[in-house]
Amino acid sequence: MKVNVGGLDRILRIVVGLVLIVLAAMGNIGWWGYIGIVPLVTGLFRMCPLYSLIGVNTCPMNAPKS
């Protein structure tokens, strides 16, 4: 797996994922809040399959050189 999620993107994914999961667990939002698992996992593993498909890379260490 090639890392393609960098700094700020990673932090935002983890925070948004955790917030959605907590809100769903507390009953403040519906069951759909558990979709927060997706950004949480992609942030923790620093790999986003959708980014790979569309050729996006927010990780500066693995960014293609121009």
Image (tube, rainbow, N blue to C red):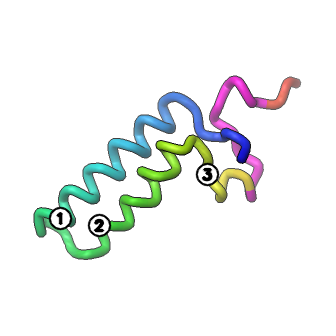
Ranked by sequence position, the earlier of labels 1 and 3 is 1
Three-letter residue code for mark 3: Cys
Q: Which residues are magenta?
A: 53-63
Quadrant where the C terminus sits is top right
**Residue 32 lies in quadrant:** bottom left
| Secondary structure type for disc 1 | helix
Q: Position of residue 25 (x, y in %)?
A: 17, 64
Q: Does the residue at mark 1 contact the one at mark 3 (Cβ under 8 Å)?
A: no
Q: Is residue 58 left or right of residue 53?
A: left
Dot 1 amino acid type: Ala
Instruction: Give the x, y percent position of residue 37.
Output: 39, 60
Q: Cα distance, mark 3 to mark 2?
A: 19 Å
Badge 1: few (under 14), some or many (20 or more) residues near its Cα, within 10 Å?
some
Q: Residue at x 12, y 69 (%)?
A: 27
| Count of marks placed on residues | 3
Label 2 CA crowd tier, 10 Å (few <14, some 14–19, many 20+): some
Checking the image for residue 42, the label placed there is none
Q: Give coordinates of residue 47: x percent, y percent.
A: 61, 46
Point 76% across, 49% down: residue: 55
Q: Which residue is mark 1?
A: 25
Which residue in the protein does label 2 denote?
33
Mark 2–mark 1 CB contact (< 8 Å):
yes
Q: Describe residue 62's horizontal placement relative to residue 14 as left or right.
A: right
Q: Give amino acid for label 2.
A: Gly
For mark 3, what is the residue? Answer: 48
